[in-house]
Amino acid sequence: MASSMLAPLSQRREAGVGEIKYEIWPPHQKGGQHVGPGPQGVRGVHFIDGHPSGIEACCGIHRSQHKNRRAVEEMIEWALTNA
């Protein structure tokens, strides 16, 4: 089961732009020492007033979940400014 959370867009952007719901994938696996370090991919969906805006992004290229999350945030920010 993927975990998710809502987070406001960063302070650089103007208020009222919306929120991003993050989902972490793949779900954490059960297993021993031969199982990977855990989920690293991030999917972000942009919401305005609690409704999806149709903008979403995924990133799983970095080894760090935090770097993937930042990349998703930058992709959504780019889509919002260039739409």
Image (spheres, grey):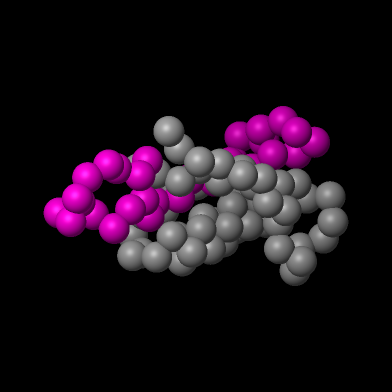
- In front here: 22 or 35? 35
Q: Name which quarter of the figure residue 34 lies in.
A: bottom left
Q: Is residue 11 above or below residue 47?
A: below
Query: Can residue 83 be seen at all in this image of the molecule?
Result: no
- Residue at 29% x, 43% y is 29
Total numbered labels placed on residues in the image: 0
- In front here: 72 or 7? 7
- Residue at 56% x, 46% y is 22
Residue 25 picture location, percent across and down: 39, 44
Residue 33 picture location, percent across and down: 18, 56
Residue 13 picture location, percent across and down: 76, 63
Q: Is residue 27 above or below residue 66?
A: above
Residue with the most extreme right position: 15
- Residue at 53% x, 63% y is 70
Query: Can residue 10 be seen at all in this image of the molecule?
Result: yes
Q: Is residue 75 magenta?
A: no
- Looking at the image, residue 19 sits to the left or right of residue 67; the answer is right
| Range drawn in magenta | 27-56
